[in-house]
Image (tube, rainbow, N blue to C red):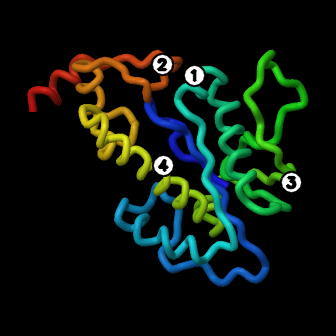
Amino acid sequence: MDEVGRGAIAGCVSVGVAVVTAQTRTAPNGLQDSKLLAEPERERLFPRLQRWVSDYAVGSSSPQEIDRWGLSTALRLAAHRALARTGTVDHLILDGTWDYVTPPEQLVLTHQPEWPSIQHPEVSCVVKADRSCSSVAAASVLAKVTRDRMMIDLARTQPDYRWQDNKGYSSPEHQAAIARHGLCELHRRSWNITVDPAAALAHSAS
């Protein structure tokens, strides 16, 4: 399992899970962490990974859910949505040191989102698992391509922000668009997004 979109200032946060079994064949050539692959390489791998895994799913939490519940809960919600769309997962390898899948023993939120019904798997957190574990790398690519395609689709109705290029992450052209048009419903307003006037002005003038 791996997440994408955590550092974006707009758009959903997504979590991918790729299920493999003892019968799963050797991973496709070229598979590695999605961040190390160019967009065309990820797109080429996508259908091959769909055929390679025994099952996969991508769950997402919207900007509004991130704003309402916070990023930690939004990540857990996206992960549970992904798990709810797959068969039983006995053991989950999670990239990083933070287990955002297992519910905490004490919930600090008075009100909670509606959680999908899942069987909670055993979770192992592995640093840089997306570079050492093929199933995690596959989850990373599947989630990244899925989320990127969502942002590209949204760019057709909101062309000013150029989601097809920045995918919701902060960039000079994104900063310039916010300076000109303000925030839209896809922006994570709880993040107190600020615009760098110099960067926005420089990009607008280019």
Q: Which residue is mark 3?
A: 122
Q: Residues within 10 Å of mark 4 (few under 14, many from 20)?
A: many
Q: CA distance from mark 4 to mark 3?
A: 26 Å
Pick the front one: 124 or 42: 42
Q: Calculate the distance from the C-alpha at mark 4 to the C-alpha at mark 1.
A: 18 Å
Question: Residue at coordinates 62% horizontally, 47% vertically from top-left?
Answer: 59
Q: Quadrant of the N terminus?
A: bottom right
Residue labelled with disc 4: 147
Which label sits in the foreground, 1 or 3? 1
Q: Is residue 148 visible?
A: yes
Label disc, if present, on residue 189 of the rendered structure:
2
Q: Position of residue 11 (x, y in %)?
A: 46, 35
Among numbered discs 2 and 4, the one appearing first in the sequence: 4
Per the model, the C-alpha gap separating discs 1 and 3 is: 29 Å
User: Based on the displayed image, in which of its 4 quarters is residue 57 positioned?
Assistant: bottom right
Residue type at mark 3 is Glu
Left or right, residue 29 beside residue 170? right
